Image (cartoon, helix red, strand yellow):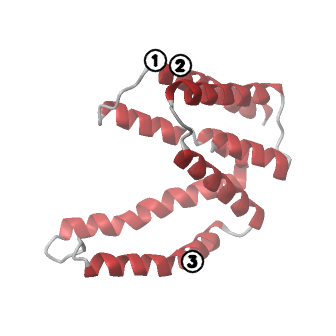
Amino acid sequence: MPILSVMLGYFFFNEKLNKKRIFSISLVIISILYLILISFKSLPWVGLIVAISWAVYNLLRKKINIDTDVGLLIESLFILPFAVIAFYIITINGNNDFKLSEPLMMIVIFLAGPMTVIPLFLYVRGVELCGLGATGMIFYITPTLQFLLGFFYYDEPFSLIKLVSFFFIWIAVIIYLKDLYETN
């Protein structure tokens, strides 16, 4: 997704790509191809679909040019009917954990909304202020934190192939962001 965001920023918003940024993008693409060709037996379709849909979402949010809070309200209203149907199905199947007998679980479920909306609001606001390229490269923080959680908490395996790809991607991110900082 970050590379797609950089590309979409370049094509739709004329965000600048100089030699350092092009080198950085090339390094990430090579790292991703290295990881896919050597580590995976097939293309990670789910990851590609999520990356494309998130990048297109960022493009549309920036293109529409609406205030962040108003845009999130409209998105939430659009999703509301689906959420109501999902809650109805959960309730009739007896899987409702929002009970007065479990106040701690009620608080956790209640806080799930703000825990989702606040980071999304800040991210969309960042895209509006900084552009798709910069926020795309900064977005590599998310998969890095997911990797650390998987490796240290869930004891997921981490091969040398993944380490090499991870290392080169972060070199590319540092080059890109350093160049972005120096030019601004």
Residue shown at the point (35%, 65%) measured from the top left: 111
* On-image quarter of the C terminus: top right
Three-letter amino acid code of the residue under disc 3: Phe
Q: SS at mark 3?
A: helix
Position above or below: 100 against 120: below
Whether residues under marks 2 and 1 lie with C-beta atoms below 8 angstroms apart, the answer is: yes
Estimate how packed mark 3 is, as few (under 14), some (14 to 19) or many (20 or more) residues with alpha carbons within 10 Å.
few
Three-letter amino acid code of the residue under disc 1: Leu
Residue shown at the point (45%, 61%) measured from the top left: 116
Q: Is residue 93 visible?
A: yes
Position above or below: 86 against 148: below
Judge from the rendering whether residue 80 lies leftward or rightward of residue 184; answer left or right: left
Q: SS at mark 1?
A: helix
Q: Residue furthest right?
A: 14
Residue shown at the point (73%, 42%) measured from the top left: 6
Instruction: Provide the residue designation for mark 2.
Output: 164
* Residue 75 position in % (x across, y down): 58, 72
Residue shown at the point (42%, 81%) measured from the top left: 84
Q: CA distance from mark 2 to mark 1?
A: 6 Å
* Residue 72 position in % (x across, y down): 58, 70
Position above or below: 184 against 170: below
* Residue 146 position in % (x across, y down): 43, 40
Instruction: Provide the residue designation for mark 1.
Output: 160
Q: Residue furthest left?
A: 101
Q: CA distance from mark 1 to mark 3?
A: 44 Å
Residue 78 is tagged as: 3
Number of numbered markers: 3
Three-letter amino acid code of the residue under disc 2: Val
